[in-house]
Image (spheres, helix red, strand yellow):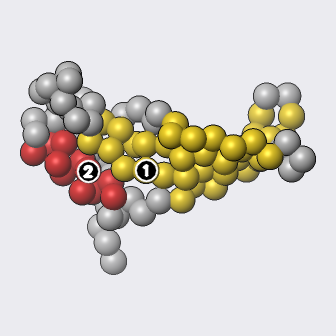
Amino acid sequence: MTFPQDWVAFDEEDGAIVFQCQNRLAHPTDPHGEPFQFPSWTRLLYAGDGLFSYEEDVYNPMRDANRVVAGWIAAGGEFESPMLVDMKHA
């Protein structure tokens, strides 16, 4: 999975970075095919020395990730390792 950014905004006064990225899986059988992806938004607070003190991510994995990964698998995608966590919606 890769995370290409759609846009980024810098708040120098508060030391914050906000961006939207795609949570992207390349098409499993066609290198030129549409990727399987969903957007998420992240806010980072800079702590200095190249480090961040805070990260907040906004997305709905039960809705978006399940749908996208299911489509990727149906198109021929395969995991490189076995599933370690079984997420269930309560």
Label 2 Cα neighbours within 10 Å, binned few <14 / some 14-19 / many ≥20? some
What percent of the width, then of the height, locates residue 24?
A: 35, 38
Precedes in sequence: disc 1 or disc 2: 1
- The residue that appears at 16% across and 35% down in the rendered structure is 77
Q: In this view, does 85 lie above or below 29?
A: below
What percent of the width, then of the height, locates residue 37?
A: 33, 44
Drawn side of residue 59 relative to residue 17, left or right: left
- The residue that appears at 33% across and 58% down in the rendered structure is 64
Drawn side of residue 31 relative to residue 39, left or right: left
Q: Which quarter shows the C terminus?
A: bottom left
Q: Which quarter shows the N terminus?
A: top left
User: How far apart, in angstroms, are the residues tagged by discs 1 and 2?
Assistant: 11 Å
- The residue that appears at 43% across and 42% down in the rendered structure is 22
What percent of the width, then of the height, locates residue 53?
A: 77, 46
Foreground disc of the pair 1, 2? 1
The residue singled out by tag 1 in the image is 39
> Which of these two is toward me, 82 or 2?
2
Q: In this view, does 75 lie above or below 71?
A: above
